[in-house]
């Protein structure tokens, strides 16, 4: 669902998935297991721990250096915290920042899955506005 949402928003600003590169800060799916009162075990996603992200620090840095993108669009808190000094996506989404260490522009955005958890018109409007801001930023770099 998040992938489809992402593709639709890319299309809304005139881009396709084939024109962007997608990567991860953690190259495996962190999970949490929970045993319910009935004894049934459920598995769900969880954010990676800092130690798990750090396992792939060099891999991601090498990929960024190899690709040499004009801009990195971070989707959610995990890549945001890995590539910037910000602590929360709510503090900085929808704005362009420059990372001095990487010498690259960074545009933080909420992860598309956030639309699943924040099902209100105000959040959706803010998210759409961030995409419109991104469209304008891309014209300038």
Image (tube, grey):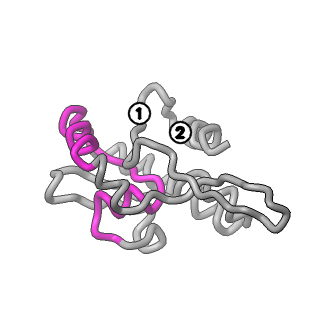
Judged left or right of residue 64, residue 13 is right
Residue 115, which numbered label? Answer: none
Total number of numbered labels? 2
Report the residue that reaches farthest toward the right: 38
Q: Quadrant of the C terminus?
A: top left
User: Residue at the spot x=21%, y=58% of the render?
Assistant: 99
Answer yes or no: do the residues labelled 1 and 2 have beta carbons within 8 Å? yes
User: Residue at the spot x=58%, y=64% of the render?
Assistant: 126
In the image, residue 134 sits, relative to residue 35, either above or below, namely above
Residue 108, how many percent across, how many down?
40, 58
**Mark 1 — residue?**
20
Read off the magenta span.
Answer: 57-86
Tag 2's secondary structure? helix
Report the residue that reaches farthest toward the front: 39
In the image, residue 87 sits, relative to residue 133, either above or below, namely below
**Number of residues whose C-alpha sits closer than 10 Å to that of mark 2, classed few (under 14), some (14–19) or many (20 or more):** some
Tag 1's secondary structure? loop
Residue 10, which numbered label? Answer: 2
Residue 134, how many percent across, how many down?
43, 51
Mark pair 1, 2: CA separation: 9 Å
User: Residue at the spot x=29%, y=57% of the render?
Assistant: 83
């Amino acid at each position: 669902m998040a992938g489809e949402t992402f593709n639709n928003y890319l299309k809304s600003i005139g881009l396709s998935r084939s024109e962007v590169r997608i990567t991860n800060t953690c190259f495996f799916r962190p999970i949490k297991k929970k045993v319910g009162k009935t004894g049934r075990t459920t598995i769900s996603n969880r954010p990676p721990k800092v130690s798990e992200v750090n396992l792939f620090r060099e891999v991601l840095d090498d990929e960024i250096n190899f690709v040499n993108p004009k801009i990195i669009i971070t989707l959610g808190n995990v890549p945001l915290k890995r590539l910037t000094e910000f602590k929360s996506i709510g503090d900085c989404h929808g704005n362009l920042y420059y990372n001095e260490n990487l010498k690259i522009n960074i545009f933080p955005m909420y992860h598309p899955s956030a639309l699943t958890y924040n099902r209100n018109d105000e959040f959706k409007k803010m998210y759409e506005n961030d995409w419109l801001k991104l469209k304008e930023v891309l014209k300038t770099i």
